[in-house]
Image: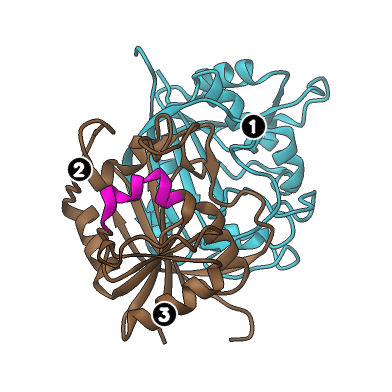
Chain colours: A cyan, B brown
């Protein structure tokens, strides 16, 4: 059975974007610093989005994607990322949760629109084969999947910045959940912690 | 000049206590897990508060207190901790920020009441001599000191638990602050990250 691994970058104060995230500036104002670890340091929305992973950041990422067979994201993240230029950069098919699922993107894009999160996770698990499912955000789909007991692992990359505003990963999440630390990777750009989600009674 | 090092334990969702923190259960309902790293594993309020630090948790703590000459906490934390049984367990004098500063505890307790945070930090810096000042919380005094540019380092111990409720460290804090990762210690009970606070124009 495919594991669902939710992974996301946050600030120390728990924001996954700065204020005003939108297409063309997906991480919001000041939010670029959340992805210094992805880009190998400072970068701009204008300068392109080539991943440049090094050292512990690369180890964390390679380790994370090594088992991934498919992915799920929310429509908001898909839009904010500008659909990654039109082609899914992640392994397998990326299932996009959206109420507007009638208008499918071309199959060769690697994206697939699905009407609800549960179905997206089911289809992604099937598509992943022996692999795992990566759940990439935004905050709302991660919270919902976590609340519904559908998340097996959390991979949280905490960047060394306090944003003070933006979208907060755990905003409104009111459950008590025990975790188990699986692995920690640390770089000047982020502290990456992989947690197993301990589910009561399983 | 003494550095001010703010140190506190939080959940992954940013709470420094569970709900209903009060004298006798200082970390609130379910909040004991925030201090598994201090106690060497599960503990209860009834069973006493002997520190039992091991491995990376002990290395982090020893490293942290090695340079500390005095401390500052808010009255709320002092009360919630039951005044640590009446004697300051930390190095030097512990200055307690309280509006009720007229009624001083006995000098041999190691506690000293001060009427406002700025004065408490000033007096602690003087008392620390060549040492640093530890700022221990609660959340309100850490936020206030951070907002006033009085915090030089943040030492955040993140326990592997989502609490879903309680007092949130960065509640209402609206500033953007750059940090620098100084050191990471990782154990099954907590991921400890020490950050330097990068102050604009200094």
Q: Secondary structure at mark 1?
A: loop
Going from N to C along the chain, the mark reached first, 3 or 2, is 2
Measuring 50% from the left and 21% from the top, which residue is drawn there? A150
Q: Which mark is residue A172?
A: 1
Q: Main secondary structure of the magenta part?
A: helix
Q: Which residue is mark 2?
A: B40
Measuring 66% from the left and 32% from the top, which residue is drawn there? A140
Query: How many residues crowd mark 3 within 10 Å: few (<14), some (14–19), many (20+)?
Result: many
Q: Nearer the viewer, residue A59 or B196?
A: B196
Image quadrant in which the N terminus of chain B is located: bottom left
* Span shown in magenta: B77-87
Q: Which mark is residue B125?
A: 3
Q: Position of residue B14 (x, y in %)?
A: 51, 45
Measuring 83% from the left and 25% from the top, which residue is drawn there? A103
Measuring 71% from the left and 47% from the top, which residue is drawn there? A81
Q: Quadrant of residue A72?
A: top right
* Disc 2 with disc 1 on a shared chain: no
Q: Is residue B181 above or below residue B170?
A: below
> Dots 3 and 2: beta carbons under 8 Å?
no
* Disc 3 with disc 1 on a shared chain: no
Asked if residue B187 can be seen in this view, the reply is no
> Dots 2 and 1: beta carbons under 8 Å?
no
Q: Quadrant of residue A68?
A: top left
């Amino acid at each position: 059975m495919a594991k669902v691994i939710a992974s996301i970058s946050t600030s120390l104060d728990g924001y996954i974007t700065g204020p005003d995230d939108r297409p063309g500036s997906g991480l919001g104002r000041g939010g670029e610093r959340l992805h210094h670890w992805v880009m190998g340091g400072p970068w701009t929305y204008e300068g392109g989005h080539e991943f440049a992973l090094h050292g512990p950041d690369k180890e964390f990422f390679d380790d994370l994607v090594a088992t991934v067979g498919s992915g799920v994201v929310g429509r908001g993240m898909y839009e904010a990322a500008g659909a990654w230029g039109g082609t899914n950069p992640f392994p397998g098919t990326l299932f996009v949760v959206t109420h507007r699922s009638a208008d499918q993107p071309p199959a060769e894009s690697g994206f697939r629109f699905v009407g609800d999160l549960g179905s997206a996770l089911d289809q992604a698990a099937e598509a992943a084969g022996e692999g795992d499912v990566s759940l990439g955000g935004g905050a709302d789909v991660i919270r919902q999947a976590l609340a519904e007991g559908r998340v097996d692992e959390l991979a949280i990359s905490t960047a060394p910045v306090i944003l003070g505003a933006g979208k907060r990963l755990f905003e409104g999440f009111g459950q008590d959940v025990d975790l188990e630390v699986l692995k920690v990777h640390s770089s000047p750009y982020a502290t990456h912690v992989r947690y197993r989600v301990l589910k009561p009674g399983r």
